[in-house]
Image: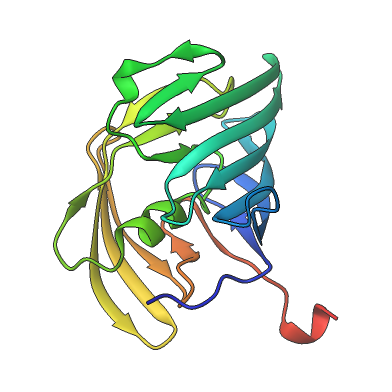
Amino acid sequence: MLADLPAFATFTHAGVRDGFEAVCFRARQATGEGFLLEGGTAAVEDGVPWSVQYRIEVDPDWCTTRVEAVGVSPSGHHTLRAERSDGRWTINGSERPDLDGCVDIDFETSVVTNTLAVHRTGLSTVPVEVPAAFVRAHDLSVERMEQTYQCTSRTGERIVFDYTSSTFDYAAQLVFDASGVITEYPGIGRRHDPPEEERS
């Protein structure tokens, strides 16, 4: 079992980009079931600035059901509306059979979207294949991403996963807190919440 989610989390992006991300977690008001993640990132990557705001709805099993996003970059203003129903994805009104089998959304611009797979698959000590609908930063285009999670340790407030993505030839140990929110994403970002006394 994972601990309750915090009201919010913030992250510093460093490595492939320089930026900052903030996200709020709340129960879905419309149905009273599942969760809503609302947040965004502003960053500079390879000398190019961009910002992306996202709204992700998941059901009680942490399966993604609806996604809305707005992005701004030198390439223009972009929007994304994605829905997943009966295992099929619709992206901006078009069916995407190439995304069959993907349960999670994963934003290139976000570190927090990794929490979706962690909550949904649990703390499995064997590798779990978790393909995702991957949203690109510069234009919010969506493609399939293959990835695998394996929980390797859990001690108090620290949970560690071996993570691999064959799509991007990337492998790392991702560290999460007791609520399943990422704290360390090597080469990409880390948790940066203010001290407790600064939140009041």
Q: In the drawing, does residue 173 fall left or right of residue 175?
A: left
Q: Position of residue 37 (x, y in %)?
A: 62, 51
Q: Position of residue 160 (x, y in %)?
A: 32, 70
Q: Quadrant of the N terminus?
A: bottom left
Q: Is residue 110 above or below residue 2?
A: above
Residue 49, visible in the rendered structure: no
**Residue drawn at the location 56% of the way across and 52% of the way down:** 14
**Residue drawn at the location 63% of the way across and 57% of the way down:** 32
Residue 128, visible in the rendered structure: yes
Q: Nearer the viewer, residue 188 or 88?
A: 88
Q: In the drawing, does residue 139 fall left or right of residue 119?
A: right
Q: Is residue 16 above or below residue 23?
A: above
Kindly give the residue lying farthest to the top in the view shown: 94
Kindly give the residue lying farthest to the left in the view shown: 126
**Residue drawn at the location 48% of the way across and 78% of the way down:** 3
Q: Quadrant of the C terminus?
A: bottom right
